């Protein structure tokens, strides 16, 4: 097993609906916080390279263990950590995966709640957060992504419509 010695954390501030005014879209893209376009592109390339390298190490390690243990059908991250570093690593990896997923979901739910409360100011952000959790819980129970494809299509169409609106907004300014 290969051990990754360093951990890299990148924090980027994302504007919420409260902070974005109509026709203020370019400030997100052209922000000088990271050195504009060049800094953003360089940061993304670095993160992509680190992510690819880490993924390749995981795949190589998994394949190596799979060849050693032919009875294993599938190896999870926790099981791979257990094979490489022992039982404590299994607990640590599973706990960190749980913590990461909770962080992603919480940030996403707060983002959705803040945007909905901006559109519907008569309701608190807490109302939208409370409404969002049961919806996500039901969606998490779906085992086939094929069932979600119509919703993905609708989301992509909505995103395309917003991009067209953004472009027309820039033309008017």
Image (tube, helix red, strand yellow):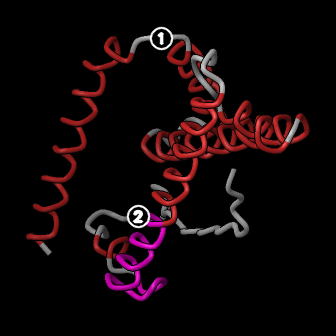
In this figure, which residue is indicated by the disc labeled 1?
A: 143
Q: Is the magenta stretch mostly helix, strand or loop?
A: helix
Q: x, y percentage for residue 10?
A: 59, 69
SS category of the residue bearing label 2: loop
Where disc 1 sits, the SS reads loop
Q: Is residue 36 above or below residue 3?
A: below
- Name the side, left or right, on which 42 lies relative to 60: left
Magenta region, residue range: 32-49
Among numbered discs 2 and 1, the one appearing first in the sequence: 2
Magenta segment includes 48: yes
Q: Is residue 60 left or right of residue 68?
A: left
Q: Mark 2 points at which residue?
A: 20
Which quadrant does the C terminus fall into?
bottom left
Say which residue appears at 23% left-offset and 27% top-offset.
Answer: 154
Vertically, is 48 above or below 143? below
- Badge 2: residue crowd in 10 Å (few <14, some 14–19, many ≥20): few
64 or 158, which is in the foreground? 64
Residue at mark 2 to residue at mark 1: CA–CA distance: 36 Å
Tell me whether the residue at label 2 lies in contact with that at label 1, contact meaning CB atoms closer than 8 angstroms: no
The extreme right residue here reads: 88
Q: On the rendered structure, is 78 left or right of 167?
A: right
Q: Which of 162 and 19 is in front in this view?
A: 162
Instruction: Choose mark 2 or mark 1, whichever is in front.
Output: 1
Image position, residue 44 (x, y; %): 41, 69
Percent coordinates x, y for residue 50 in the rendering: 51, 65
Q: Position of residue 106 (x, y in %)?
A: 65, 40
């Amino acid at each position: 097993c290969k051990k990754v010695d360093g951990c890299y954390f990148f924090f980027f501030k994302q504007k919420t609906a409260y902070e974005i005014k109509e026709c203020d879209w370019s400030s997100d893209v052209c922000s000088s916080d990271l050195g504009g376009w060049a800094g953003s592109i360089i940061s993304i390339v670095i993160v992509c390279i680190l992510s690819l390298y880490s993924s390749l190490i995981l795949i190589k390690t998994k394949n190596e263990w799979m060849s050693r243990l032919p009875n294993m059908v599938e190896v999870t991250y926790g099981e791979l950590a257990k094979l490489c570093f022992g039982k404590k690593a299994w607990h640590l990896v599973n706990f960190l995966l749980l913590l990461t997923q909770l962080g992603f979901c919480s940030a996403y739910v707060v983002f959705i709640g803040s945007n909905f409360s901006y559109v519907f100011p008569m309701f608190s952000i807490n109302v939208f957060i409370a409404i969002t959790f049961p919806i996500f819980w039901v969606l998490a129970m779906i085992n086939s992504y094929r069932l979600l494809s119509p919703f993905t299509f609708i989301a992509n169409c909505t995103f395309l419509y917003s991009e067209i609106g953004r472009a027309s907004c820039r033309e008017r300014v």
